[in-house]
Image (tube, grey):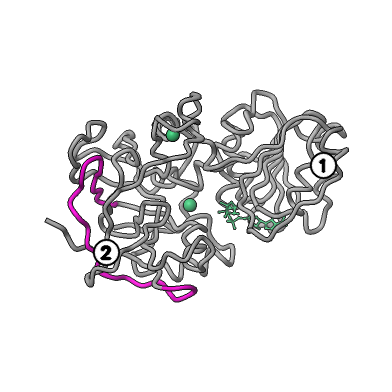
Amino acid sequence: MAQQVQGVIAPGKNEPVRVETIVIPDPGPGEAVVKIQTCGVCHTDLHYKQGGINDDFPFLLGHEAAGIVESVGEGVTDVEPGDFVVLNWRAVCGQCRACRRGRPWYCFNTHNAKQKMTLLDGTELSPALGIGAFAEKTLVAAGQCTKVDPEVSPAAAGLLGCGVMAGIGAAINTGEVGRGDSVAVIGCGGVGDAAVMGARLAGAARIIAVDIDDRKLETAKKMGATHTVNSRTTDPVEAIRALTGGNGADVVIEAVGRPETYKQAFYARDLAGTVVLVGVPTPEMQLELPLIDVFGRGGSLKSSWYGDCLPSRDFPMLIDLHQQGRIDLGAFVTETIGLGDVEQAFTRMHEGDVLRSVVVF
Ligand code: APR
Ligand code: ZN
Ligand code: ZN
């Protein structure tokens, strides 16, 4: 029996989001229905609303979620009703060329639910990142449900579903930060702060946080930054070099997604160092760099999609570390809100007032 629940939809380009009744089909083969406990508000949800991702309105927003599996369809064996799960948008296929090469974190054919959730009049919804979790329940592919320790706070755990995983993974997976490394992080919002946390977890000796907002730099210190640079008033390349014996950092993580900050990352990096781009640029942005510098400075220039994470490997591990007190995922939860408060949360996010607002059901 299909069920009706309340969910937040983006009805059309730049129109305010609103709470609507959503029809959730019973799970088909390989699918699961999850009762959502918490869901964080991410920039990507705002980008959907603004029409910046695609035009497949209406969207069912929300994708940084934790909840309890309610029912599963035919053939589902990895999760069962009652399991506490964090939802992911990388349910790997096991068949594509990336998976076959043993690099499933790059999977090019990730799974989502095949059936559609709809409005009462039958209009099909496009779930954000194949999840759609600003809703009391949602329908996903079973592989999008990652079981983790059920003792954890759902609000903290759910954030691993997107932004926090992207940042931690940019440091520990893509950047391969190692013990004793120097790391600089440019842009200290939720993603950059998570990169700071990941760098500390990996044993970085020096972690330089760069932002144009002093409030963000204060938070970055709490996450593990050893030094801070306000790049509105100080040249960040000079400052990072000065803090690293004149050389530049071993790993520089760009968590803004702009050409000018990417250039800063490029030149603030030591010879043979690594730049990681985890901030998401917009399609019209262009990068111009002297090719001789790209060659002459050596090292690697990498992008980090979703922190190059493998949810089944990384979520349970990071939840365990959180439960042991070795990282504090709760530090990203600035406020908890209701389902009707998402529009205001977008405004607060835009004004830089919050790391994460989390909808609690
Ligand atoms: N130099 C340094 N920091 C900057 C600059 C700049 N020129 N411009 C903006 N920032 C800082 C902001 O002050 C803010 O602290 O970058 C941070 C961006 O943080 P958020 O807006 O909170 O975004 P976040 O959720 O961290 O995501 C960062 O990753 O997932 C993508 O779309 C997301 O591109 C965005 C990026
Ligand atoms: Zn694959
Ligand atoms: Zn997100």
* Mark 1 crowdedness (10 Å alpha carbons): few <14, some 14-19, many ≥20: many
**Which residue corresponds to the image point at 28% horizontal and 68% vertical from the top-left?**
123
Q: Specify which label sits upstream in the sequence, 1 or 2.
A: 2
The magenta segment = 12-36
| Left or right: 289 in relation to 274 | right
**On residue 54, which mark appears?**
none
Callout 2: helix, strand or loop?
A: strand
Task: Give the labeled residue for mark 1.
Answer: 267
| Left or right: 329 in relation to 18 | right
| Residue 356 against residue 273 in the figure, above or below | below
Count of number-bearing discs: 2
Q: Position of residue 116 (x, y in %)?
A: 28, 57
**Which residue corresponds to the image point at 49% horizontal and 62% vertical from the top-left?**
54
Splitting the image into 4 quarters, where does residue 273 fall? top right
Disc 1 marks which amino acid?
A: Tyr
The quadrant the N terminus occupies is: bottom left
**Which residue corresponds to the image point at 74% horizontal and 51% vertical from the top-left?**
261
Splitting the image into 4 quarters, where does residue 194 fall? top right
Q: Position of residue 309 (x, y in %)?
A: 49, 35
| Residue 312 against residue 36 in the figure, above or below | above
- Mark 1: is the Cβ under 8 angstroms from ligand 1? no
